Each structure stands twice: as C-alpha cells, then as structure tokens.
Image (cartoon, rainbow, N blue to C red):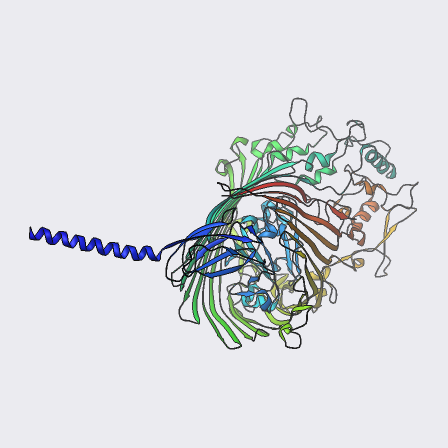
Amino acid sequence: MKKNFCSLSHLQLAFGFTLLVSGVAIGQMRTITGTVTENNQPLKGVSVFQEGSNEVAVTNASGVYRVQVSGENPVIIYRHSDYPERKITLGSRITVNISLGKEKEIEEVVLNAGYYKVKDKERTGSIAKISAKDIENQPVTNILASAQGRMAGVSITQNSGTAGGGFDVQIRGKNSLRPEGNYPLYIVDGVPLNSQSNALTSLSAGILSKGEASPLNSINPNDIESMEVLKDADATAIYGSRGANGVVIITTKKGSFRKASLEFTMNTTISKVNQFIEMANTSQYLQLRKDAYRNDNISAYPVTAYDVNGKWDQSRETDWYKTFIGNTFLSQQQQLSYSGGNSQNQYHLGIHHQEQGTAFGNGMGYKRSGFNLSNTYSTEDRKLKISPTIYYTVQDNNLNDADLTRQILLAPNAPALYNPNGQLNWENNTFANPLAKLENKYSSKIKTLTSNMNVDYQMFEDWSLKINAGYTLTEQNESRLNPSTAFNPSTGANSSTSVRYDGVVVRDSWIIEPQLHWNKRWNNHKLSALAGMTVEERNDQILRLQGNDFSSNDLIGNLSNAKVQKVLEDNEVQYRYNAFFGRFNYDYSGKYIVNLTARRDGSSRFGPQKRFANFGAVGAAWIFSKESFLENTPWLNFGKLRMSLGTAGSDLIGDYQFMDTYTTTTQIYDGVSGIYPSRLFNPNFSWEKTTKMETALELGLFKDKVNLTVAYYQNRSSNQLVGLPLAATTGFLTVQSNFPAKVQNTGAEAELNVNLIRKKNLRWSVAANLTVPRTKLLEFDNIESTSYATMYEVGSSMNIKKVYELKGVNRDTGVYEFSDLNGDGKIDLNDRTKVVDIGMKFFGGLSSQINYKNWSFAFLIQGVKQRQYSLDYSISLLGIMSNVPSYMLDYWTPENRDARYQRPGTGTNSDVTRAHSLYQSSDAVIVDASFIRLNNVQLSYKIPLKEGLIRDLTLQAQAQNLFAITGYKGLDPEVAGFYLPSIKSYSLSATLKF
C-alpha cells in the first residue's frame, strides 16, 4: 500500500507542477484583437504579426484582425504596401486599434546590380529598371516586347510579328563591327543565359526574321518581378569581358512575408496584323502589266502570262493581304501561383500555360508551358539564408516553312486557292498555288531548365559569405519537312523526292561564384567590399541531319524511314570561363560616394598568349542636396551628380577561332573523304575592349513630385576582331585577328517622372524618356583593302550604307538615271560611294498611369526617329507578274513623264532591268521610317469583395500596338523585308486571389 501511495503522491505532484507551468505559459500567451483604419475607414489587407514570430494575421474587409502573441512586453508590427510600417509596444493591452495615417510618399527603390544591391539614390552607375507592375498581364510572349519605349538608352526592335521570333537589343549602340558581337549579357536569377539565338539559322531562315529566336522567349513575362539593365562602366565592369554590350538582369517572382495566398489569372487575346499599305487592285494591276508589254514592244502576250492573256479571269478581285496574313486569331493564357511565408520561410510556386495562334491560320501556332519554384529559408538567428530557384519551360512552335507575307504580291486576279471539291486549285497547271507551301512544315520544340542556389552566411558582425551556383539545360529540336505534296501533281513528284531536315542542339552550363562580403559603418563613414570568383563551363552539342527518298509521305515524320540519311553537321563545343572580381564602395555622410570595381577574366575562346585580361571602373557620386547651403532649399529635395569611367570587354567571337581547323570535303578519293585547312592558327587572338565614360545629373524637385535624370555617355571600343586580308599564296583570303579599329558611341539620355496628383483615392503619374544616340567609326587603318570597305567609312556613322545616287527618271527614256560620282563616264560599282546614314536618330517613350479608388488606367507611347529600307528594296521589277503597293502606280508612261518610278518592264529589256537593280542599291530605297506608336493601353478594376473564399477579383482590358502614326510606306516601320508585321491585340483578363 505504501508503494501505491507513494506513486499516487508523485502523480499528484507532477500534475500540480504541470498545471503551474501551463498557467505560466497561458499567462504569457495572449490573443490580441483590434481594428486598423485610415481616415476613419477600415483598411483591408494589413499584415499584423509579433516581431520575431512566424504567425501572421491579415485584416479583413472591416479592418479587424486577431493575432496571438507571447512574452512580457511584445512588439506588434503592422505592414501594408501603401503605408509606412508601424510598430506598437503592447504592454498589458489585449485590444489595439490603430490608424496607419499618411500614405507613403515615395518608395525607396532598391536596384539589383548583379553581385550586390544598391539604393537608387545611392548608386554611382547607370541602371534602368522596370518592375512587374509595368509589364504584368500584357498580351505578349516576351518581356522585351513589354519593355519597348520604357528605358532610356535601351533600343529594342521586334524582328517580326511571328511568335517565338527574335528581338534586336542594343544598349547604348553597337560596339563591334560584327553583328554577332553586339548581344548583351542576360542574367536570370543569377545564372547567365544564352545570349544568342535559340534557333539554327539553316532551318529557321525564311521563317523567322533573321532566323532568330530570342532566348528570353523561355520566360513568361508574368513570372518576372523586375528587369534591370546595367549600362555604364561602373555598373557593367564587374562583369568584365561579358559586360561591354550591357547586362540585362532578370529576377523572377519570389515568396514574401505574408499569409499564404492563391492567385489565378485567365487571359484571352484577339489579334490581327497591322496594315500600313494598300495594294493595287485588279484593274490597276492589269494596266501595269499591259504597259510593261507595250514598253517592251511585245504585242502578243506570252503563253505563260496567264494574268493578261485570258487564261485567268480578268474581272476577279482578291485581297491577298487579308487572305494570307489578315486572319484574326486567338490566344489564351492561364497562370496559377501560390505564395506566402513567415519570417523564416518564404515560398512561391507558379504554373503557366499559353497558346497563341498566328495570322497565317491553318492550325499553326505557338505554345509555352512551365513552372517556377522558389524558396527562401533563414535560420532563427538570421545568420544563414538558403534560396533555391527552379524555372522550367517548354516551347512548341509550329509554322509552315516560309513566311507567307510575301504572297500578298500575288496577282489580284489569280485563281481561287481551292476547287469546289475543297482540293488545292492548280488552274490547269497555270497557277503555282501558294497554299501548297502549307504542306511544308517547320516545328521547333525548346525545353529550358534554369536552376539556381544562393547561400548567404553571416560569419561575423561585418562579414558574410555568399555562394551563387547555377545550372542551365536547353534542349532544342527543330525539323523542317518538305513533302512532295507541296508540288503540283502534274510535276510527277512523289515521296521519293520528299526531304526532311532535323536539328538537335543540347546546351548545358554550370556556374559557381563564391563571394566574401564586408560591410562596416561608424560615425559618418560607410564602407562595403566584396571579393569573389567565377568558374563557368558550357557545352554545346549540335547535330544536323537530312533524310530523303521516303517510301510514303505518311512516313516523313520519322527520319529513320528515309532511304537516304545524311549527317550535315556533328559538333561538340566547349567553352570555359573563370574570373576574379572585386568591389569597394565608400560613402561619407551620405553625400560623397566612391565605387571601385575590378575583374580579371580568362576565356577559352582566345589564344594561349592572350587568354586573360583585366577590366575595371571607378564611379563617384556627390549628393549635393545634402550640403548645408542647399539643405533648406524648398524646391530641391534631392540632387546628385555622378560620373563613371572604366573598361569592359567582349568574348562573343565564337569558339576555337584562334586554332588551326580542318573541314571535311564532299569529294571522295579512293573511297575516303578528304579534309582541307579552313582556319589559320593565331596565338595572339585577343579581347575586344570597350572604354566607357558617363556623366549624369539627377534631381528630385518639389517634394519629389518631379524627378529628372539627364546623362551623357561615350563608349569607345577598340581591338576589333575582324578578318585581315592575306596574300592569295597563303591559300586563305583572311585570318581572324585583332585590328586597331575603333568604334565610338556617344549619346544623351533624359528621364522625367512627374507625380501630378498623389492623394489617397487619386494618383496620377507621368513618365517620359528620350535617347539621342550617335555612333562613329573613328579608326580603321587600310580599310579599303578589307571586305568592310563596302560597309563602313572612317569618320562616318556605323549605321551608314554606301549606295548609288538616284538622279530621277529620264523623261524621254523612262529609265532611272544615276550620278556618275567618280566622273569616269559610266555607272558601275565605283559609283556606289554615296554615304547615307540609316538607323535611329532618337527614340523614347511616354507613359502615364491614373489610379482612382479601385480603377486604374495606363498607357505607353513609343516614338522612334529613324531611316530604314523601304518596301521598294524587296520588290521585284515593276511590271512582271507580281502585284505592287498602290503608291508604286506613279510610274513612267509617255503620258506621265514626271513619274516617281521608271517605266514597267517584263524583264526582256536589259537597260530597264539593270536600272532596277541599281535602284535597289541607291539612296532612293532608304526613307524616313519614323513612327509614334500606342504600344499599350490598359484599364483595370478591382472589385471589392466581402469576406469569403475569393479575397480580390481584378478585371483588366488591354490593347497592344493599337495604332501607329507614320509616313512610312511599307509593311511595318519596325520590321524589315517581307516578314509578318507587328500584331495588334485586344486582351481581357481576370485575376482572382484566394
């Protein structure tokens, strides 16, 4: 009994102790309630949490919250994106009602400079930024389309209206004589992305303009949190050899310290091609053709002139522009994201799917699906932070193997495309039906994986260790099918003549960047420094195949079914890169800032004697508005003068260019394929270098209602990589080598942001930017002996074209006349010396946003002053069996001797044919292609909802490329040649937040 009694006593004692401890715990844990208001109105969506705790409460539509706290004297934090953060020491209270008061005046902008972050007002370099709110939900497939006209110094041109195509991006001009040497560096979540095209030109040429597919097509614009562009030496020198052409840094969306939320967006877009020209109608076209035969003294129309000899119906009228590229098409996108987190763990998961049709119709289109996953974990003591990111997309682009835009030149009285029975119409073998081209297919499937891991460890009070590691994998599969069904059956073509081309490219790369950071502050001094290194490796595997002679066209979908199979290319390319870099920043009293950056690079692309190079920059800023003599100036609240000077480089020259290389021949000798030397060894093959200088003034006026930045820059690129001419006895025409040619880019930039109204229920802001670029070839010794002599001229712009000078149309002969510029009495290549500057004179953008309660309205206007090739450059001889724009009907006839265009011809008169060829290489085809375009206009409304499953519902209507004001006579002032013009889109979207 005693034993049992003792056991019972112990149980009672333990139970009593538990009650005591529980009572103490209960005494420390409290539930706090209250209401958050602003101007006596309840405020929804305020995050309420105890400092240091992971539990977050969010106020409802009535402004009410309920949160648990612990401890003797806890601190509660109230956080909302539109209001200053508030901290309340609780004491013994269990009810706290607060008002957040005045809204934030100006948000402190923090810029991502790559290896470090810097406050916008404290930066010494030139960095442009656009954020998610500028680009979200726009009906585009590439962020570059959203960024057009938004950033000074950044010229973005869309190559065509075909989805999955390319963009031309120039950051403060062209630094290299080689087009492929002007690509910027793309960084996505700390990982370098392939800067060049994600398409094999041999397969995509004629389909995509320039045969290019932008690498940024792999990123859904709605997954992007921000895009920063580094422009000057201070910002780019830390990237060394890869920063000469500017750096584009993209940060995808991450989790945040807030209650978990689910967001679903649906977007539907209707699109069609913008039309800037009108084609000749049937009567005008037939008169043109008859005049051509009359001028060439041909009275009996040839048997093949079906349009005028009566074979085709001369009363038939077809708008081929509308038929081939005028289709209205549908696009849809769905996006689901889940994000949230607490003070230690933030997460984000996004899934998207997009389908976009084409103006060509016939089931062709572009698809993209993917997901992004990110997580940020911090230990409780905040010393260790780990941030993994994974981004994966699959692009599927299905087109026919030629852009149908050129088919708008089909004779307007050409026969119908289909017979009454629905089959292709060949009109008794008089008609090469262009729809047969739809049998020729082009498909591209690109899978892209980008993964990144950031580790940040706070070793000591002022020291931290960071490691950035990343891996990318791109699998690119392209195919081009040319079955015999694309030919007129009367030709007798069968599956034995069918051909299939395939291209497979696998690119993988990895990068590791350990970094040591140091930050110290005392009194008025603030110092920060970092030192790090980069180790990177890329491996490309390229395989191109051809198969022909299929037993059936039904089997053309598989290369193994071809009786004849050829390997056209089988390459493995390895690129290795390493670097050491550092940065030192000194800030005295928040007024005087100096920033030093340096980098030593090594690249496998250069000769063994020139493999390493040093780059660096110095930047300085003086925030003069903090000086005592200006501190109380009522109209000036911020003023900064900054300057930078430094060097960056470029290794965009391809791989193995310095080595002896050999190429296999197609000739067979004694049953063996031979090889021949195709490149000479050059151990001194070295870096192109760019020296950059910038001066800028930044002003914040009238309590930051007006913010102005003006800048002047000068970039000089030397050590150009060009082909130097060699004596014919060497067996080579040129050898790739560095040459003391020097290219200069200068320019002025201005950015203006005005907050016209900034009240609780009404906000109105306007932003504008303007860039005036200039470029010049300063030096190029003995340029006359090189192939560049026909393209460039020392002392002239890098955008020049050397052309013939058109005098006009001879009133008597009706043939073009040209100036004999060298005075030798004849017109030949030696007269093609007139210099015409082509390209942009200035460009900019104007945007505005108005927010009224739950309504939001915004627009963006882009303007470009430029000269470009007219459509005349791409149109065949006037008078042959091909239609023309109606403006070309002003041609010479005996009755119209003062015409703009020469007499039409059939191709039998050599003088007329030669004059037309000279005309297309003359100054007459380079015209003003300036335009002002309404790039985007959007209206959105956030529907206020009561408590329930759906927290927010936002409806949005947008229009993209709504209209353009231009005098350019062509398909599109931005798209060169006969490629699909820009697309006009109307979009509706709905965003639900749960």
* Front-most of residues 20 and 315: 20
Question: Residue 566's x, y, as percent?
Answer: 52, 43
Question: Residue 332's x, y, as percent?
Answer: 58, 39
* Front-most of residues 120 and 695: 120
Dividing the picture into quarters, in which one does residue 331 lie? top right
Dividing the picture into quarters, in which one does residue 726 lie? bottom right
**16 relative to 708, above or below:** above
How many numbered marks appear? 0
Question: Residue 293's x, y, as percent?
Answer: 85, 36
597 horizontally vs 312: left or right: left
In the displayed image of the protein, which residue is found farthest to the top? 421
> Is any atom of residue 92 visible in this view?
yes
* Front-most of residues 453 and 838: 453
In the displayed image of the protein, which residue is found farthest to the left? 1
373 horizontally vs 911: left or right: left
Dividing the picture into quarters, in which one does residue 708 lie? bottom right
> Is any atom of residue 975 visible in this view?
no
132 horizontally vs 787: left or right: left
**22 relative to 322, above or below:** below
* Front-most of residues 316 and 858: 858
874 horizontally vs 563: left or right: right
Question: Residue 511's x, y, as percent?
Answer: 46, 60
